[in-house]
Image: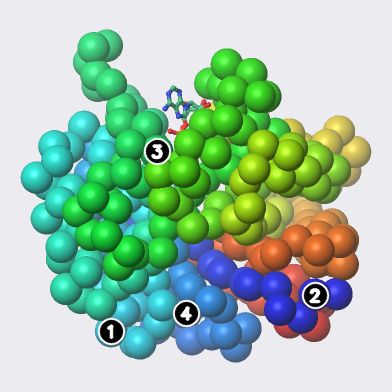
Amino acid sequence: MSKSAAISFEYFPAKTDAGREKLLNVTTPELQAISPEFYSVTYGAGGSTRDNTRGIVEGLNAQGLSVAPHLSFGLDDEATIAALLEDYKAAGINRLVALRGDLPSGAGGGARLVYANELVEFIRQRTGDHFHIEVAAYPEIHPQAESYEADIQYLKGKFDAGADSGITQYFYNVEAYFYFLDRCAAIGIDKPIYAGIMPITNYANLARFSKNCGAEIPRWISKRLEGFADDQESIRSFGIDVVTQLCQTLLESGAPGIHFYTMNQSQPTLQICRNLGL
Ligand code: FAD
């Protein structure tokens, strides 16, 4: 197993004071046992979570942890995004996850989102090399992509614009990830692409997310999960075993690192990391 694999953790911005308090003062100290490279905090299109994202980012930063705010233009203008970049820079934050994002529901039909490669270019123009920029990658291909080849060419466009590394959408098909890495290398992408991994804790939520984002839940996994019905303990235990096995294969086969979509819960991610001996 690669001992040098980078581990990172993703949060979404808790909406309430109590949620934020728990994330910063309970969940994070627990996850710190794994000494991740960084924590990332998601961002809602159109700035819908801007203040919540910032609150969590600042809280993690104040604890001396490396933090990567997610960022997208949404429907914001350049001045708004430039000001946010300056604020992050002034606070000593030096990583970002740059995204196109999705249109907020209710946005007018004429609205156009700024592609992630354009955001990367904007960040580089405004802040030079200050930020380490991560971008999203899709081993099972983005749901709106014109084709497999077009999607990885657009990923290359994000690296050509100055991104430093990629983080994948979550997946459970390990072959899809390694095939994707090979295809990316074949078109000249030479930056690391970390595997995004979603622990399994709730079948209904996972099925809903997966449908929207184009991540496939293999039939044998969905059949097992359906069979457990409301038996949360069996879902939890099966989910930990399956995801541990997936991560073990990834690390043994040379994945450069794993980014856990923690869903703001420490226990499933911690248990998987412990099983892996991390
Ligand atoms: P892009 O890379 O811009 O691609 C979007 C689509 O357009 C793709 O189909 C691509 O093939 C195509 N495309 C790309 N560039 C061009 C171009 N120049 N011209 C024409 N077509 C192009 N969502 C959130 O709302 N908040 C988050 O914080 C968030 N974090 C995420 C983190 C990770 C690691 C991942 C994998 C996803 C995340 N998402 C998040 C979801 C993401 O916003 C959606 O998947 C969104 O639909 C695409 O964003 P992107 O940056 O991948 O877009």
Mark 3 vs 2, N-terminal side: 2
* Front label number (4 vs 2): 2
Q: Quadrant of the N terminus?
A: bottom right
Q: Residue at x 87, y 67 (%)?
A: 252
Q: Residues within 10 Å of mark 2 (few under 14, many from 20)?
A: some
Label 4 sits on residue: 28
Label 1 sits on residue: 62
Label 2 sits on residue: 2
Query: Disc 3 beta carbon < 8 A from ligand 1?
Result: yes
* Front label number (3 vs 4): 3
Label 3 sits on residue: 117
- Measured as percent of width and height from the top left, residue 154 is found at 52, 31
Query: Disc 2 beta carbon < 8 A from ligand 1?
Result: no
Label 2: state its secondary structure. Answer: loop
Q: In the figure, residue 182 lies in which quadrant? A: top right
Q: Residue at x 56, y 69 (%)?
A: 8
* Front label number (3 vs 2): 3
Q: 260 or 228, which is in the foreground? A: 260
Residue type pointed to by label 3: Asn
CA separation in Å, label 1 and label 3: 30 Å
* Front label number (1 vs 4): 1
Residue type pointed to by label 2: Ser
From the viewer's perspective, is 147 left or right of 99? right
Q: Residues within 10 Å of mark 3 (few under 14, many from 20)?
A: many
Residue type pointed to by label 4: Thr
Label 3: state its secondary structure. Answer: helix
| Residue 26 versus residue 105 in the image, above or below | below
Q: Residues within 10 Å of mark 1 (few under 14, many from 20)?
A: few
